[in-house]
Amino acid sequence: MARTAGSFGEKTEAALREAAVALMARHGYEAVSMRRLAAEIGLQAAALYKYFPTKEDLLFTLLREHMEGLVAAWQAADPGGNDQTRRLAAFVRNHIVFHVERRHSTHVSNMELRSLSPARLTAILKLRSSYEKELRQILREGAANGEFAIDDPGLTAMAIIQMITGVIVWFRPDERLSVEEVAERYLAMTMRLAGARARTEAG
Amino acid sequence: MARTAGSFGEKTEAALREAAVALMARHGYEAVSMRRLAAEIGLQAAALYKYFPTKEDLLFTLLREHMEGLVAAWQAADPGGNDQTRRLAAFVRNHIVFHVERRHSTHVSNMELRSLSPARLTAILKLRSSYEKELRQILREGAANGEFAIDDPGLTAMAIIQMITGVIVWFRPDERLSVEEVAERYLAMTMRLAGARARTEAG
């Protein structure tokens, strides 16, 4: 976590992040105390408070890093260019793999926005909205150049994001399908939903 | 709530249900005490404990009633018959209207399964699975009679349920669209996703 770099130790940082999202996903943010969290990773509460003066500081850092990580992963995965079908496929694959690998963090990010102060909530929603805008743009441009058949890019973007984020509700690594297979099937459904040309011709 | 009928009073029951799901949706189940809940509706904690000996008894009642209400609403909405496109439309409309009207209750039902004892969790999951099975059956029969083009009815059912439940994340009654309009747009997306015949011919 950026603010603790060089002081907390990378291993402690990773342990803290993992313990925090696991405990908060299990019990809810309000029910998890800083004391309990510190104990979970073998720290004194005082040491934890040194880096995160309030529990909300910690929550905000977790949520911000989650969203920044998602935006960065998408920037790395985005093939760019004018082929919006290709970009949509990259978006769906990246989104599913990212969230399946961060199930607890995703739960906390979806549920605990309610626990942020207004200014911090605004900061996270801004990040989220810039990410969702990428998908809306892909859909809008793909509709404009005839790749997709979409009535309402905004609503379609929300529908796709909720559908593909929903994978974490039921998917577990020991399921009959691998993450990649699940992503391919959700991609096929996304392409249908977007009225993608290839699909329409085939079906 | 069934167990309190005739003793608690209908008004108190309704106030309790509303306060409980609102507080739990806002703060998380673990963070809400029976004392606070009783205070919220102007009861003594002792009076509440009389009807719900533990907080988990209350949670279970809320979750069970939510799922039983959903199943009952679907049974009333299901047109039956062999026209699976018509049944799918009824399913989507009923699901969206039911959940938008019970946003807090839906949040609690989705998040607080983690707080149930194993036996009660099993009971709720059984109800949920019987509901999801209805959608799988519609998709499977529709695929068999050529109404839909679907690779994987199980995965498609999960995708549709997550997509249409996701409406509660962003939809508010003061949005630019009414619940019914949102339901119609999600229905159009569902039909595409299911490769429904009418859609394919049109698009």
Image (cartoon, coloured by chain):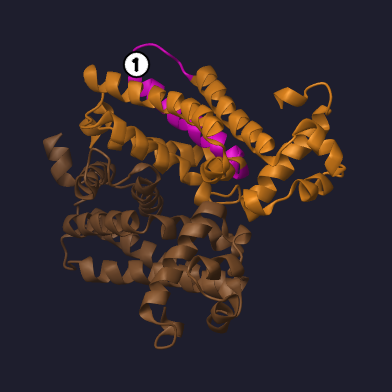
Chain colours: A brown, B orange
Which region is colored magenta?
Answer: B78-104
Q: Is residue A174 left or right of residue A112?
A: left
Which residue lies at the image location 50% right of the left edge and 36% below the top edge?
B96
Q: Which residue is mark 1?
A: B83
Q: Is residue B20 above or below residue A139?
A: above
Query: Quick one: B29 or A16, which is closer to the camera?
Result: A16
Q: Quadrant of the N terminus of chain A?
A: bottom left
Q: Is residue B105 left or right of residue A187?
A: right
Residue type beneath disc 1? Asp
Q: Is residue A182 left or right of residue A112?
A: left
How far across and how far down the image is residue B178, in percent?
A: 55, 43
Q: Is residue B102 located in the magenta-colored stretch of the structure?
A: yes
Q: Is residue B166 left or right of residue B57?
A: left
Query: On what subunit does the disc labeled 1 rest?
Result: B
- For residue B41, say whether it is visible: yes
- For residue B90, say whether it is visible: no
Which residue lies at the image location 82% right of the left edge and 44% below the top edge?
B41
What is the quadrant of residue B131 in the picture? top left
Query: Quick one: A124 or A84, which is closer to the camera?
Result: A124
Q: Which secondary structure class fits the magenta region best? A: helix
